[in-house]
Image (cartoon, grey):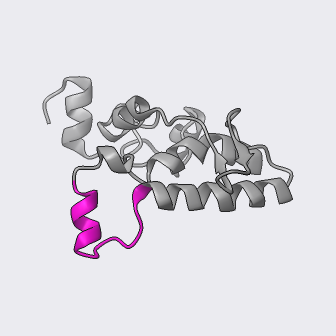
């Protein structure tokens, strides 16, 4: 069960730290104003470094074939994040959006393969995704 959760949430977790610093339009300003104390890339790297050690301790395998320790950097290297998939999910085109998360009863959601942990989609966004009027 823990391995299944890690397999499912690894890449979405890395994406949730936000875009790479070079591609984040407000990152520099947020750092200057001290809204953020660490950059997206720094936080993501810290997460990977800590989680890789925890996963190994629990005999879990992180679902990234490119994950490996880099002695020169003293950090783990990891594979590229699929930002297209992330943007599709944020736009309301993720797997749980197809299940009708907000309106289906829990047994129906579970039977359709959607756990309760799927993020709900606002009505207008779901309507836009299906082409229906909100």
Q: Residue at x 33, y 70 (%)?
A: 36
Q: Residue at x 55, y 42 (%)?
A: 11
Q: Quadrant of residue 131?
A: top left
Q: Residue at x 82, y 54 (%)?
A: 56
Question: Which sits in the foreground, 46 or 9?
Answer: 46
* Above or below 70: residue 99: above
Question: Which sits in the foreground, 9 or 26?
Answer: 26
79 left or right, relative to 15: right
Q: Locate residue 30, reporting x and y percent.
A: 25, 66
* Above or below 61: residue 112: above
Which range is magenta? 26-40
In reply to whether residue 29 is colored magenta, the answer given is yes
In reply to whether residue 75 is colored magenta, the answer given is no
11 left or right, relative to 121: right
118 left or right, relative to 34: right
91 left or right, relative to 43: left
Q: Is residue 42 visible?
A: yes
Q: Residue at x 52, y 48 (%)?
A: 14
Q: Locate residue 123, reporting x and y percent.
A: 23, 43
């Amino acid at each position: 069960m823990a391995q299944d959760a890690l397999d499912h949430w690894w890449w979405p977790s890395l994406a949730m730290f936000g875009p790479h610093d070079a591609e984040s339009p407000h990152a520099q300003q947020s750092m200057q104003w001290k809204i953020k104390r660490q950059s997206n890339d720094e936080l993501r790297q810290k997460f990977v470094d800590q989680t890789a050690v925890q996963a190994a301790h629990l005999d879990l395998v992180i679902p990234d074939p490119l994950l490996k320790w880099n002695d020169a950097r003293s950090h783990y290297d990891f594979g590229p994040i699929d930002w297209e998939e992330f943007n599709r999910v944020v736009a309301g085109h993720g797997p749980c959006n197809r299940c009708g998360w907000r309106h289906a009863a829990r047994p129906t959601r579970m039977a359709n393969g959607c756990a309760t942990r799927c993020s709900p989609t606002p009505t207008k966004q779901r309507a836009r995704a299906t082409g229906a009027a909100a």
